[in-house]
Amino acid sequence: MLADSDARVAARWEARAVAGCCACAAVLYSLWLLGPWINPGLDALNGYVSEFAARDQPGSRLFRTGDGLAGLLAAAAAVAGIRCGGGVVGWSGLLVFGVATGLDGALTPMTCASYVDSGCAVRELVGALPATHAVHEMTSSVAALGMLVAMGGLAWAGIGPRARWGWAWCSATGLATVVTLGALWLGAGAGVAQRAQLSLIATWLIAMAVSHARRTRSAGGCDA
């Protein structure tokens, strides 16, 4: 009986950790919403949100710090979720998302903003930018893939938002990701599509936080 009670207490604390980390990660991941006020010169229609965090842009330290902390918190939520048991594939996807997002902000930010800086665009085209600029594209892609695995895996396991909403989030985010890639290829509208993608990710993190906060008041834990 004592062991069962201890296990329930541990599960509740782990659910609280998931809720708190997901909520804070969502807020920090959404700092780009301040971008138009901090750096109004960037192109919201076509420019990548990551350009707010480019090393040569005003306010970049704020956005890089936000991404780094958001990634760390998402990874912490994933670890707490894995400890709860269940949904290992989904939690692993969230862990990948967190690590890749943290790298995006802390170690591999864009060097410059190619959509507003023609010199940067030329250097990007000829491969004259530092390796971290190219690595940023890779870590961003890994983060997006990790999030899709997280959404789909946790929906499949019945963890987080109700299954139909979890699958809807996953489908909408996947569609936004595909549209973003298509817009990049066409050379127009990538900024709008990516902002939709990031908004879906942030709201999913909030939904995960709410779901697990409710479970801390029940007898179960993360996968109750």
Image (cartoon, helix red, strand yellow):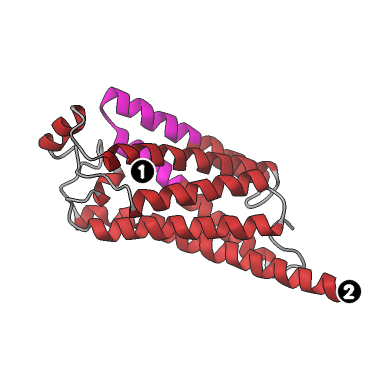
Task: In the displayed orientation, state which residue is furthest to the right.
Answer: 1
Q: Residue 56: x, y in percent?
A: 17, 50
Q: Is residue 195 magenta?
A: yes
Distance from the alpha carbon under mark 1 to that under mark 2: 50 Å
Please state which amino acid type lies under the numbered disc 2. Answer: Met
Side of 198 relative to 80 (left or right): left
Task: Decide: is 35 above or below 139.
Answer: below
Residues rendered magenta in the picture: 174-200
Name the foreground residue: 62 vs 104. Answer: 104
**Image quadrant where one finds the N terminus:** bottom right
Task: In the displayed orientation, state which residue is furthest to the front.
Answer: 131
Q: For mark 1, does the 10 Å Cα neighbourhood hold few (<14), some (14 to 19), or many (20 or more) residues?
A: many
Please state which amino acid type lies under the numbered disc 1. Answer: Arg
Name the foreground residue: 140 vs 220. Answer: 140
Query: How many marks can you see?
Result: 2
Dominant SS in magenta: helix
Q: For mark 2, does the 10 Å Cα neighbourhood hold few (<14), some (14 to 19), or many (20 or more) residues?
A: few
Task: In the displayed orientation, state which residue is furthest to the bottom.
Answer: 2
Label 2: state its secondary structure. loop
The residue to which callout 1 is attached is 195
Task: Decide: is 58 above or below 17.
Answer: above
